[in-house]
Image: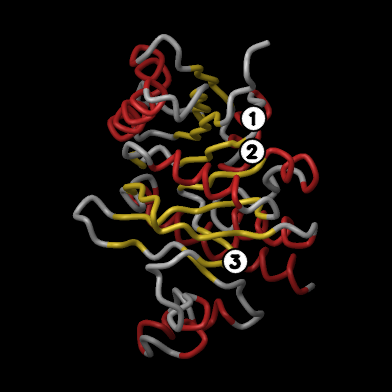
Amino acid sequence: MSQRPRVDAVIVSYNVRALLLECIASLVAARKAGEVNRIVIVDNASSDGSAAAAQAADPRVEVVEAANRGYGAGANIGIGMTDAEYALVLNPDTVVPAGAVATLVAWLDAHPRHAVAGPRLRRPDGSVQPSRRRFPRPWTPIFESSVVEEWWPGNPVAARYHLSDVPDDREQDVDWVVGAAMLVRRAAIAQAGGFDESFRMYAEEVEWCWRFRCHGWRTGFVPAAEIVHHEGARAAQDLPRRLAEFDASRVQLIGRLYGA
């Protein structure tokens, strides 16, 4: 009997063809190295030829062309198509260096009560993109990623949310990790469910980690694993819409966590 694959990769993509191909190339290399088994691309109705380009990039890449119902809905389609012990959920604007997936797998293997392992994210210039957080409090959206934070950088509410009091160069439990790259345990998904599809874009990974926590699972930050992230590549195409969706999702999240 063949051994069950350890990791399947799921990427949800929308109109970032060049970056998607770079991501696929890194995953194909990871597959050749035995770190990844299946590579599933869920294309959310792109108009730039992403789906065809992804299929042409490698014949073993599985491409699903879906209606654009949001990131979480697309990710759920891909997760539902796979059955590996771990699901590597990625944004299409990521690049996965050799060894990163293996490091995350080894960490989750050693921490059986953790549902999620998140890597350290680096921008293409090598700088660190902060990617670990505490759960927001009801008033956090007023002080973080807002006009207030522009006027009062480093205010204590935003600092707490960003874990500014804890160094980011060591393994640690966190409340949630940025959804650009998450290795997620299949058993935890089976218990807590997939992404909440009512979050169209933004905050869906926060709610997911919250739900994992409610089911007794934990989330870990693993800086020994590093993944490159071209932060905000898709959102930059339509900034006003991005801001509207970002704020709407944060309001929805606070309602979900703390009530209306």
Q: Quadrant of the N terminus?
A: top right
Residue 127 position in % (x across, y down) = 24, 61
Q: Earlier in the sequence, mark 3 or mark 2?
A: 2
Q: Are marks 2 and 1 in contact (CB under 8 Å)?
A: yes
In the rendered image, the vertical position of residue 52 relative to residue 162, given as above or below: above
Q: Earlier in the sequence, mark 3 or mark 1?
A: 1
Where in the figure is residue 220, as x and y percent of width and height? 56, 59
Using the image, determine if residue 204 lies above or below residue 33: below
Task: Rate crowding at label 2 as few (under 14), some (14 to 19) or many (20 or more) other CA atoms within 10 Å.
Answer: many
Numbered circle sitting on residue 77: 1
Question: Quarter of the image holding residue 122?
Answer: bottom left
Looking at the rendered structure, the kind of residue marked 3 is: Arg
Going 44% across and 39% down the picture, which residue do you hit?
Answer: 101
The numbered mark at residue 250 is 3
Residue 226 in picture, x, y percent from top left: 36, 50
Q: Which residue appears at 43% of the width and 80% of the height?
A: 164
